[in-house]
Image: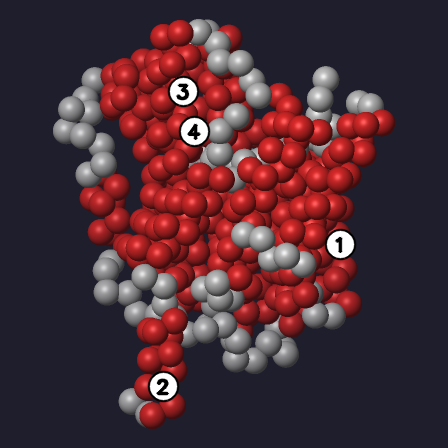
């Protein structure tokens, strides 16, 4: 090995975060991030970039992989970035850190709800969240855009992708194929534009993986107890089957999941399904943690674990496979060119998400508009000037909402 290569390998090795550090970072994010998958992705991006743990290209590639695959985008993204940083072990600890807080909180609240009845919503606190979410997503898109949108052509790809996402909400609500179509078309555009000039890929070298991809299957399977037979196993298989055929955000999944659980299997009443969704909305983490609520209702704590694993593990395994393949094929000049089109498109979709999230900012009175604007500006200042930890922005906005949105 040459001395230069040895230095490079050493630098990569010393800069790689420890598994414990990765777990704690994603655990903190999982404990404090409300607002859907785009907010979660933005917080992950900002947190890793601020700590210089991942390059912007690594983050946009992880987002791209997650958006192309079935299952919960936010959790799949954590698997992809974890694999890029520390291999299979990194993917596992990032996955555990991101889903554990939501699983614990939703399971606990589900038990309380099913035993004691409806839990009152903390309306004023949650009115403060949308403004902070807009700030976080917009800043993440801006900072990614500075590095991924480098010329007029990429700027056009970025703008068209943003416009397509906004038109989807107006013209094709629930159309999961729009996001996949944007990625494919942007990749084709990048291939045509940059095929001849792409040269050697600028991405960092692929780190060697000591473990094989197949080893992840028994790792996750071990989390399902040996008692997982009968109803518990049926819960797992039901959610596993849904998780690998549903594309888009959690909100796109809701009608299909409701039809399966309420109308086909009769596991829940319509009111119980709505209550399960409400619990995931007042807690951090993915909306698809509703699977834990269903599991609690049917089979207690083992049912909750089976529902959560069924919803989140199969897409995670698919993500690992694709993330591994991407690190190999990225060395192709054609794939490198395609990625130069896809990455600006991802930035555009994140900008569009900021606009979409902004629609949920309270605006039913003059004071609510003013209060939302104040929280938005305060969040932007806190992120850009005061360098406040992004994972803290949404909880702080909730406190501000409690005091500002008085009835």
Circles 2, 1 touching at the beta carbon (< 8 Å): no
Q: Secondary structure at mark 2?
A: helix
Q: Secondary structure at mark 1?
A: helix
Q: Residue at horizontal 38%, vertical 14%? A: 112
Tell me which label, 4 or 2, sits earlier in the chain: 2
Marks 4 and 2, how far apart at CA: 44 Å
Tell me which label, 4 or 3, sits earlier in the chain: 3
The location of residue 352, given as percent across then percent down, is 70, 45
The location of residue 377, given as percent across then percent down, is 74, 46
Q: Residue at horizontal 32%, vertical 86%? A: 6
Tell me which label, 2 or 1, sits earlier in the chain: 2
Marks 4 and 3, how far apart at CA: 12 Å
77 on left or right of 4: right
| Residue to which mark 1 is pinned | 159
Identify which residue, 372 or 196, lies in the foreground: 372
- Residue 237 showing in the rendered view: no
Find residue 7 and name its label.
Answer: 2
Q: Is residue 228 above or below residue 184?
A: above
Circles 3, 2 touching at the beta carbon (< 8 Å): no
| Residue to which mark 3 is pinned | 109
The location of residue 15, given as percent across then percent down, is 38, 71
Mark 1 crowd level (few <14, some 14–19, many ≥20, 10 Å Cα): some
Q: Secondary structure at mark 3?
A: helix
| Residue to which mark 4 is pinned | 289
Q: Is residue 132 above or below residue 149?
A: above
Mark 2 crowd level (few <14, some 14–19, many ≥20, 10 Å Cα): few
- Residue 213 showing in the rendered view: yes
Identify which residue, 225 or 279, lies in the foreground: 279
């Amino acid at each position: 090995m040459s001395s230069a290569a040895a230095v490079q390998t050493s630098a990569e090795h010393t800069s790689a975060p420890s598994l414990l550090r990765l777990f704690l970072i994603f655990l903190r994010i999982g404990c404090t991030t409300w607002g859907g998958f785009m907010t979660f992705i933005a917080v992950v991006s900002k947190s890793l970039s601020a700590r210089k743990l991942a390059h912007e290209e690594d983050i946009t590639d992880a987002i791209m992989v997650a958006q192309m695959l079935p299952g919960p985008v936010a959790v799949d993204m954590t698997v992809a970035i974890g694999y890029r940083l520390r291999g299979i072990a990194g993917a596992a600890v990032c996955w555990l850190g991101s889903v554990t807080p939501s699983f614990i909180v939703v399971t606990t609240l589900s038990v309380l709800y099913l035993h004691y009845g409806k839990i009152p919503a903390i309306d004023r606190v949650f009115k403060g969240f949308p403004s902070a979410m807009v700030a976080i997503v917009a800043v993440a898109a801006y900072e990614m855009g500075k590095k991924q949108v480098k010329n007029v052509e990429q700027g056009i790809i970025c703008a068209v992708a943003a416009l397509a996402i906004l038109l989807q909400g107006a013209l094709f609500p629930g159309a999961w194929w729009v996001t996949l179509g944007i990625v494919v078309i942007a990749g084709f555009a990048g291939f045509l534009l940059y095929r001849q000039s792409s040269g050697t890929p600028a991405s960092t070298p692929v780190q060697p993986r000591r473990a094989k991809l197949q080893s992840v299957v028994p790792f996750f399977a071990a989390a399902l107890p040996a008692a997982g037979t009968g109803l518990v196993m049926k819960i797992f298989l039901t959610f596993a089957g849904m998780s690998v055929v549903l594309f888009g955000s959690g909100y796109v999944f809701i009608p299909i999941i409701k039809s399966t659980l309420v109308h086909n299997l009769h596991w829940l009443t319509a009111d119980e399904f709505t209550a399960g969704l409400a619990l995931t909305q007042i807690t951090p983490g993915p909306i698809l943690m509703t699977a834990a609520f269903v599991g609690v209702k049917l089979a207690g704590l083992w049912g909750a674990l089976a529902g959560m694993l069924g919803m989140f593990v199969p897409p995670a395994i698919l993500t690992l496979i694709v993330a591994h393949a991407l690190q190999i094929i990225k060395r192709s000049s054609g794939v490198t060119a395609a990625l130069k089109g896809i990455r600006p498109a991802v930035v555009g979709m994140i900008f569009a998400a900021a606009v979409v999230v902004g629609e949920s900012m309270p605006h039913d009175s003059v004071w609510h508009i003013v209060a939302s604007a104040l929280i938005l500006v305060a969040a932007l200042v806190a992120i850009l000037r005061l360098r406040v930890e992004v994972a803290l922005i949404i909880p702080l906005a909730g406190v501000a909402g409690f005091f500002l949105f008085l009835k």
